[in-house]
Image: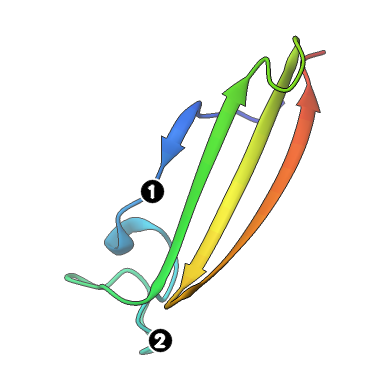
Amino acid sequence: MPIFWRGNHAPAQVADGIDNNFDGEIDEPGESGPLRITWLITDDAPIPQTKTIRVDVAMRQRTTSVTSYRANL
């Protein structure tokens, strides 16, 4: 079973495994750039015994979000 990290998370750009500044290098020291990935995991929402998982991907002025639900089995 996967491990879930509850709460709101925004990993540092130098440690997120993504080429945030599009220069061909992943996680180089001092990396910053327009690409950001964050996620939020909430227990017992929208109903008891479930988790709501939302992932947001932002680049410049655009953001895309994906939400899924998982039952606690």
**The residue tagged with tag 2: helix, strand or loop?**
loop
The amino acid sitting under disc 1 is Ala
Residue at (36% x, 89% y) in the render: 23
Q: Which of 38 and 22 is in front in this view?
A: 38
Label 1 sits on residue: 10
Q: Nearer the viewer, residue 47 or 50?
A: 47
Query: In the figure, residue 17 lies in which quadrant?
Result: bottom left
- Cα gap from disc 2 to disc 1, whole angstroms: 19 Å
Q: Which callout, 2 or 1, points at the residue further toward the start of the chain?
A: 1
Label 2 sits on residue: 22
Residue at (45% x, 76% y) in the render: 61
Camera-near label (2 vs 1) is 1
* Picture layout, residue 32 above or below residue 40: below
- Indicate the position of residue 36 as horizontal and vertical percent values: 42, 64
Q: Is residue 27 left or right of residue 73?
A: left
Q: In this view, does 69 lie to the left or right of 6?
A: right
Local packing at callout 1 (Cα closer than 10 Å; few below 14, some 14-19, many 20+) is few
- Indicate the position of residue 37 as horizontal and vertical percent values: 47, 58
Q: Which quarter shows the C terminus?
A: top right
The amino acid sitting under disc 2 is Phe
Residue at (40% x, 88% y) in the render: 24
Local packing at callout 2 (Cα closer than 10 Å; few below 14, some 14-19, many 20+) is few
Residue at (71% x, 45% y) in the render: 67
Q: In this view, does 34 lie to the left or right of 70?
A: left
- Indicate the position of residue 54 as horizontal and vertical percent values: 62, 43
- Indicate the position of residue 40 as horizontal and vertical percent values: 53, 38
Q: In this view, does 23 lie to the left or right of 39?
A: left
**The residue tagged with tag 1: helix, strand or loop?**
loop
From this viewpoint, which residue is outermost toward the bottom? 23
